[in-house]
Image (cartoon, grey):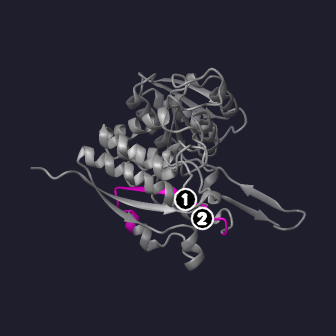
Amino acid sequence: MMSPPSYRIAVIPGDGTGPEVIREALKALKAAGTRENLLFDLQHYDLGGDRYLKTGEILPESVLAELRQVDAILLGAIGHPDVKPGILEKGLLLELRFRLDQYINLRPVVLYPGVETPLKDKGPAEINFVVVRENTEGLYTGGGGFLKKGTPQEVAIQESINTRFGVERCLRYAFDYCRKRNQRKKLTLCGKTNVLTYAFDLWERVFHEVAAEYPDVTTDYGHVDAVSMWMIKNPEWFDVIVTDNMFGDIITDIGAIIQGGLGIAAGGNINPAGVSMFEPIGGSAPKYTGQNVINPLAAIGAAAIMLDHLGQPAAAARIEDAVRKAVAGDIRSLASGKMGKSTTEVGDRVAGYIAAD
């Protein structure tokens, strides 16, 4: 008799309410594993603001070496009120993405039945698309610097670095994902070719070159400002959107709000050939820490995306179906503190649906 599949998962609860939402995500993960006969070796790491304040460490090389050996990473949230903004974000989040070469940020934008959207006359049929964001280049590489800092003549330069290699591998992932998603098979390149005439000349040329290898995928293009408007006015136009790092960061937050808010938005930082990391999109929400009122559904959704990435779509579907049931009948609001149930109760309800399914 074959042994059940086993996965080593690094768990980084992080800061603020991160540990609270990760606690509920693990309930759902274990419940889905039980139903699908999967085993999980959970390895917990205390990376985040508290560790930094105590030891000065953000991401020790020894820990990074261990993370390279796991099957996936489940992250709660990063951001501590006593740590200057940028230190943890660059030193931990961006460092993990860069060092583990997680060159894709994958963001499903799905509106579940029963969840309110601020868009008039739009519902689940119209809001169902995915954003593929390049995750390791562009403006987030840290290229640039200061000249005469602190003087009236100060100059600050931030460079967007785009390589043919990085652009092409992102586009190929997007084409493959669009084909695998097998819905409208429409891939939209989001850029700014009329102003950013170097970076997006490269993106557009490679986009059309790669498209020739995918005749079954329909392609189109939109400037980022137009795409931002269309996501609100006509979200049904989109199937899969592919874009660079900065524009992807912006439009995925638009996606989050039209799907019901950060409380339900989840995503993955993907290295198709290595270790990927999955997380809720919202921050650490320190003002809610310890109150048991934060919405855990985004973290639970991140666990589902992780399972699908690990080749366990049935287990992922169990979690997603349970979330759909929870938002359809059990939760008054997705807003933290207004759910009508506690963080623990929401997590228990989702796990219960998985176990009873």
In this picture, which residue range is highlighted in magenta? Answer: 66-82
Please state if 204 lies on the left or on the right of 195 as rendered.
Answer: left
| Disc ID at residue 88 | 2
- Check the image and report above or below for 315 versus 186: below
Label 2 neighbour load within 10 Å: few <14, some 14-19, many 20+: many
Label 1 neighbour load within 10 Å: few <14, some 14-19, many 20+: some
Cα separation, mark 2 vs mark 1, equals 7 Å
* In magenta stretch: residue 77: yes
The image quadrant where one finds the C terminus is top left
Q: Is residue 261 visible?
A: yes
Q: Residue at x 52, y 50 (%)?
A: 342
Q: Which residue is mark 1?
A: 93
Please state if 275 lies on the left or on the right of 109 as rendered.
Answer: left
Q: Is residue 69 visible?
A: no
* In magenta stretch: residue 184: no
- Check the image and report above or below for 153 versus 239: below
Farthest right residue in view = 152
The picture places residue 331, in percent across and down from the top left corner, at 52, 39
Mark 2: which amino acid? Leu
Farthest bottom residue in view = 55
The picture places residue 221, in percent across and down from the top left corner, at 60, 27
- Check the image and report above or below for 81 versus 172: below
The picture places residue 59, in percent across and down from the top left corner, at 51, 69
Q: Are marks 2 and 1 in contact (CB under 8 Å)?
A: yes
The picture places residue 250, in percent across and down from the top left corner, at 64, 42
Q: Residue at x 52, y 25 (%)?
A: 124
Mark 1: which amino acid? Leu
Report helix, strand or loop for mark 2: helix
Q: Residue at x 84, y 68 (%)?
A: 150
